[in-house]
Image (tube, rainbow, N blue to C red):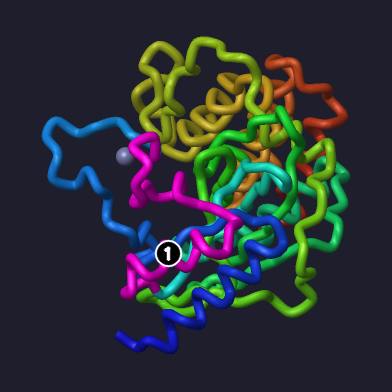
Amino acid sequence: MDSSVHSYALTAALAAARRGLPVFPLSRAKQPAVRSPHHADWPRVPCRGECGRIGHGVYDATTDADAIHTLFAAAPWATGYGIACGRPPHHLIGLDLDVKTGTDALGVFESLLAAHRIVLPPTVVVRTPSGGRHIWLTGRPGHTVPNSAGRLAPGVDVRGTGGYVAGPGSRTLHGAYRLAPRSTRTPAPAPRALLRLLTPPPPTPPPPPPPPSPAHPDHQPPDAPARERRADALVRFVAASRPGERNARLFWAACRAYETGHGPDVAAALVRAAVSTGLPEREAAATVASAARHTPP
Ligand SMILES: [Zn+2]
């Protein structure tokens, strides 16, 4: 274990804590580094630190310098630190734009912002080892942003209440987390329209899972060309959207349609499907147009 990596992470964690961000040590695998005091217990104890000991992952996160030293001393193998999201005073929200899986999450996210006319204020941007970005924003007291993966847009994961992001100065098996050029030092408030997108609607019955390819036999003759069946699946995927996810699902479906070259044929049907879920027509058309611009011909 290279002790300089450990002390570098500790120094960076203390600096984050001075800005009001609660931190805890992470291992090289980006997991909480302090061993759970309950690791040998069977059955598992549901404990979020009520026992008074350390080793409860994100629930250990603190801004207290002495407590941070104690946490890092208990995990000399720690090479990074996590920042707990959703906690006062900042109520941090981490947007994880992933590029690992071949998704252009950065471009997708920019298009999503453009479709909603959202202008992101200068804020903290962390470059991840894979070349992705973490965008940090602050939320509001009493406003819970849930964690989600790919709900906002493909390749965009949201870290909210109960989640955490690796802080700049962390080192993992895959490399280092660093502040991106032009990043600010403190996170800026999330624009109101973005907060709305990040907050799910009140619970409704879950929609049917999106049928990616095989068409429903009632709706399509068995010999319908595969591309027509795929287009039909995209339209049904949009039609099954719930409020709060309508735009993201429409955008995703339109991107897939334009990628496979049948965007122009299917655009009107996608807009109609989105309108049937209650999305205003102008908004739906703008989202599809944005997907068309985003997708290379
Ligand atoms: Zn405990």
Q: Nearer the viewer, residue 273 or 18?
A: 18
Q: Nearer the viewer, residue 106 or 228?
A: 106
The N terminus is located in which quarter? bottom left
For residue 49, side relative to residue 23 (left or right): left
Report whether residue 260 is seen: no
For residue 184, side relative to residue 15 (left or right): right
Q: Residue at x 27, y 56 (%)?
A: 35
* Pointer 1 residue: 70
Q: Position of residue 275 (x, y in %)?
A: 75, 19
Does the magenta segment cover residue 214? Answer: no
The C terminus is located in which quarter? bottom right
Q: Position of residue 159 (x, y in %)?
A: 56, 46
Q: Position of residue 39 (x, y in %)?
A: 19, 47
Does the magenta segment cover residue 64? Answer: yes
Q: Residue at x 39, y 40 (%)?
A: 49
Q: Position of residue 234 (x, y in %)?
A: 54, 32
For residue 228, side relative to residue 28 (left or right): right
Q: Which residues are magenta?
A: 49-78
Q: Quadrant of residue 161?
A: top right
Quarter of image, ligand 1: top left
Q: Residue at x 70, y 66 (%)?
A: 125
Report whether residue 198 is seen: yes
Residue type marked 1: Thr
